Image (cartoon, rainbow, N blue to C red):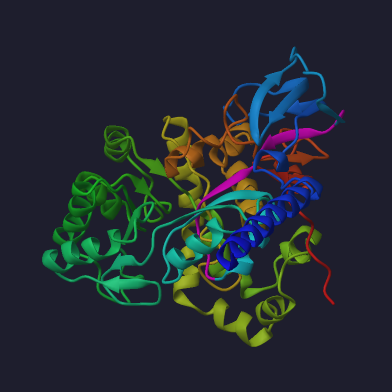
Amino acid sequence: MDSIKSACLCVIVFVATIVIAVNIFAAAPPQESQSARYSLQAWLGARVIDGTGRPAIENATLLVRDGRIESVGRRVKIPAGAERIDVTGKTIIPGLICAHGHVNDAAQLGVYLRDGITTVLSLGGAKEFALREQNAKAPPGTVPRLYVAGPIQDSTAIPGAVAVKTPDEARKSVDDLIRNRPDIVKLRVDDFLGARPKMSPEVYQAVIDQARKHGFRTAAHVVLLEDAKGVLRAGVDYIAHSVRDHEVDDEFIALMKKRHAFYSPTLTREVAVFAYSETPSFLSDPFLLKEADPAEIAKIEDPKRQETMRNDPAALWYKQHLPVAMRNLKILSDAGIPIAMGTDSGGGPGRFQGYFEHLELEYETKAGLTPMRALVSATSGAAQAINIGKQVGTLEKGKWADFLVLSANPLDDIRNTRTIESVWVGGVRVPAKAPKP
């Protein structure tokens, strides 16, 4: 009898539990799904520069569904229920892509993003793999898309790099690196104007070959024309800085075309090396000051530091050779070499992340590129260099809805990329910078 009573009691408790659970479930609000974070939006009346290099589309409609672009053009059918957003008189461009920056801290990702840099290739650093993993877990709309190289293969173990001095060391180092699945393998061929040993051709050939053997692309830090030719002959995929000692020649252009290689000018890297011998005018740009660290500005404006820079032989060399780098950019762009906007931002003092990407576009136009060509270098050109052109870089059907809404037209003045009204990543609006307590 007792066993029967116990069994009945268990049944009653079980049923009661089910009833309570069902009632609670019915009363609870539905959980937000992944797609519910996005809405169907129709952006109406803007000028759309789609990043392909084709002419801007005036009075366009940009239709975004579930974070991706569904349609863009002048005759877009707007589905029932779509949120209609009037952006008449505004300009919409793809989110800008930095194909050569450096991220050393998670907080720097927000700086890039709020300045309209929706994708970053961080080309070398000890913390990059951990930052990439952390970035992947961040809430939508709070970080840019991040791609990384990890530690640089170098002749000297300076910060962010590992030393490889023989082909065997190079192969072993690459094998160690690729366990972390870098998005590209970076090598540095530079003696810092005679200040240290330079990686030999035998060693960089081993780095490139070992990376290719395992299916990884390579990017090279170079300064000199002959070194750039050497890494191209060895099979490198990406020249990650300007050639700065001589004008590029037909042989270099032929090697670039043979390798289908990309070229990143990083003109603002040179600017940062010498410009702070005085206080440059851009240090008072409100677009810079809204994100810049006042302590870093103060260091740059220190008279003793400026005097040291005025007398630094390396700074003087880079200042003298910036015009060479600018001419080379124009020569290569005119020759049809794909240009990928990069800056080396975050790679040293005064290389302001976010701001330098906009300043780089200004220098590209000073070098002779049209504003449209400059924009292509920072959108589809950079996306192709990172090998993500099927996902981002242009405002075309099926791609992620990464875009900026500007109050002025950058085709009139490239500095208008700084007139940002809103930034969107995967259809999610980027929140403004939180005010300081």
Q: Looking at the image, which residue is at 17% across and 66% down?
A: 172
Q: Quadrant of residue 66?
A: top right
Which span is picked out in magenta?
87-104
Residue 225: say if magenta: no
* Vertical side of 401 occupied by 182: above or below: below
Q: Is residue 119 left or right of residue 362?
A: left
Where residue 123 appears, as percent x and y from the top left, is 43, 59
Q: Residue at x 62, y 80 (%)?
A: 306
User: Of residues 76 and 19, which is closer to you in this image?
Assistant: 19
In-image side of 73 versus 145 (left or right)? right
Tell me, yes or no, whether the highlighted magenta stretch contains residue 101.
yes
- Residue at left offset 16%, top offset 57%: 206
Q: In the depicted view, which residue is nearer to us: 201 or 281?
A: 201
Say left or right for 81 vs 371. right
> Which residue is most to the bottom?
304
The count of marks equals 0
